[in-house]
Image (cartoon, rainbow, N blue to C red):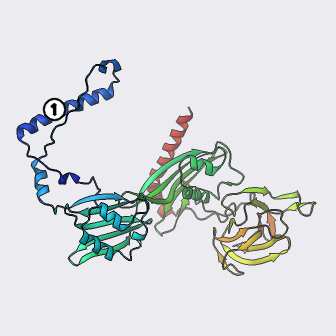
């Protein structure tokens, strides 16, 4: 259902009017044009203030004559019009109907019809309620966009008021934002006005290309193209999916373009059609810092001796969600010596991953459970031999721990040949947007 936008309240219908002769109308039009053009001239040229010092100021009040059409509208008090009220803090439906000048009978019937309405219990200050009424106070239609994607609609019928609360179809508006990393990625996205949900998507999309834990550098720059979802009234409701990203990390450019194939599969690809989805994520945490890397010689903080560290430690607060880095099956979930609470996931081929020192496991997780890449399987803790909260992560190949940053892992399939023409056609405008934003950024540096 689509609605025409509201222009203004036709309060003018209630004013007293007089007939306007053709002679008066002609003089009114001629005279009214004089200050208009004078205003435009004054706006274009800033005059010397002394020119106006001796000009006397006189307040002139004249009757406003309205055309005959307003007389006709005034005579018909049942002529419907739209008006709008903004919800105030502490407002009730009854108070809003009073401000809309709804007659007592319609107000009572409305309140009876809306007594079980969720929307009338979710009156959000600042949001608008729109009503179609007549000058006599008859309520014909009232609508209110509440929640994120829902519409409250009350309509008068021959049998009284009819209420409906329905999910609405959101319209997409494309947004483009750019930024430069000075201290942290989230600091840069905040400064660029990029919503947190979009920043999280950026990290997830490029997780297999950029290690945001140890590869991020000051001066790295990025551009993101994403959706803003609007309701039928043109109000912003939420952010949608990221459509394209360009991230320059340590001088290397990474691009990701969203595409859905003819078979319904969707994902992010390079401009050449190569999939960005790797079999393994680069890290099991969304954002953190590495406190200990993979090494053959590290002084153990608990045992107080030098020994190999066959994994990567990510420092993070207790309770931080831990994600499975690839699809697989849980082969172990329990306590194991120095690891404390440990999860081991068996993946396809020779690969296994291990997640140690957890505070707890995800609800329902047990041996034999299937997990998908990105699923939360546990939470950061400091069980076992740990001096502080962190995650100990291992990548094992044929049972041997390997440095995750040095193992070449398989990728997902590229765009199928039959889908390439469609891919090129549909992503051309997105790539062009990235180029525009890049050129604007480079121009600002000169």
Q: Is residue 368 left or right of residue 3?
A: right
Q: Is 206 displayed left or right of 381 in the figure?
A: left
> Looking at the rendering, which quadrant does residue 80 occupy?
bottom left
Dividing the image into 4 quarters, which one contains the N terminus?
bottom left
**Residue sitting at 14 percent across and 36 percent down?**
29
Residue 215 coordinates in the image, percent (x, y): 70, 50
Q: Is residue 241 left or right of residue 295?
A: left
Residue at the disc numbered 1: 31
Left or right: 335, with 411 as reference point: right
| Residue 136 shows in this picture | yes
Q: SS for tag 1?
A: helix
The front one of 112 and 163 is 112
Indicate the position of residue 415 as horizontal and vertical percent values: 53, 62
Is 325 drawn above or below residue 228 in the view shown?
A: below
Q: Nearer the viewer, residue 200 or 231?
A: 231
Residue 283 quadrant: bottom right
The foreground one among 143 and 309 is 143
Q: Residue at x 23, y 28 (%)?
A: 58
Location of residue 63 in the rendering, given as x and y in whole percent from the top left corner:
15, 40
Visible in this render: residue 350? no
């Amino acid at each position: 259902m689509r609605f025409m936008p509201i222009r203004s309240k036709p309060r003018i219908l209630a004013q007293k009017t007089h007939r306007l002769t053709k002679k008066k109308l002609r003089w009114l039009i001629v005279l009214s044009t004089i200050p208009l053009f004078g205003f435009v001239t004054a706006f274009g040229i800033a005059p010397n203030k002394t020119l106006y010092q001796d000009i006397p100021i006189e307040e002139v009040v004249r009757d406003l004559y309205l055309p005959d059409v307003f007389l006709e509208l005034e005579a018909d008090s049942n002529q419907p019009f739209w008006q709008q009220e903004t919800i105030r803090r502490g407002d009730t439906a009854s108070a809003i109907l009073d401000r809309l000048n709804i007659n007592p009978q319609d107000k009572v019937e409305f309140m009876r019809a809306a007594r079980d309405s969720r929307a009338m219990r979710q009156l959000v200050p600042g949001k608008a309620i729109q009503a179609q009424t007549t000058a006599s106070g008859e309520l014909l239609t009232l609508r209110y966009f509440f929640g994120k994607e829902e519409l409250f609609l009350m309509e008068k019928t021959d049998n009284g008021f009819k209420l409906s609360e329905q999910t609405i179809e959101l319209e997409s508006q494309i947004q483009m934002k750019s930024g430069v990393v000075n201290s942290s990625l989230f600091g840069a996205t905040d400064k660029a006005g990029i919503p947190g949900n979009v920043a999280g998507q950026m990290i997830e999309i490029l997780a297999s290309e950029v290690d945001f834990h140890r590869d991020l550098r000051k001066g790295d720059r990025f551009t993101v193209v994403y959706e803003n979802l609007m309701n039928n009234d043109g109000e912003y409701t939420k952010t949608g999916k990221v459509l394209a990203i360009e991230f320059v990390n340590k001088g290397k450019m990474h691009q990701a373009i969203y595409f859905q194939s003819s078979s319904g599969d969707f994902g992010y690809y390079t401009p050449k059609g190569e999939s960005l989805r790797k079999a393994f994520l680069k890290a099991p945490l969304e954002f953190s810092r590495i406190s200990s890397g993979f090494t053959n010689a590290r002084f153990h903080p608990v045992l107080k001796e030098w020994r190999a560290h066959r994994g990567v430690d990510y420092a993070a607060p207790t309770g931080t969600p831990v994600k499975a880095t690839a699809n697989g099956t849980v082969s172990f979930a329990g306590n194991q010596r120095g690891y404390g609470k440990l999860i081991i996931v068996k993946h396809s081929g020779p690969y296994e991953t291990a997640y140690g020192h957890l505070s707890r496991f995800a609800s329902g997780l047990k041996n034999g459970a299937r997990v998908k890449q990105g699923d939360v399987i546990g939470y950061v803790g400091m069980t076992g031999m740990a001096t502080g909260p962190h995650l100990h992560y291992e990548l094992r190949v044929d049972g041997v721990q390997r440095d995750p940053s040095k193992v070449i892992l398989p990728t997902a399939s590229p765009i199928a040949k039959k889908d390439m023409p469609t891919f090129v056609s549909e992503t051309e405008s997105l790539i062009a947007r990235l180029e525009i934003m890049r050129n604007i950024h480079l121009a600002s540096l000169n």
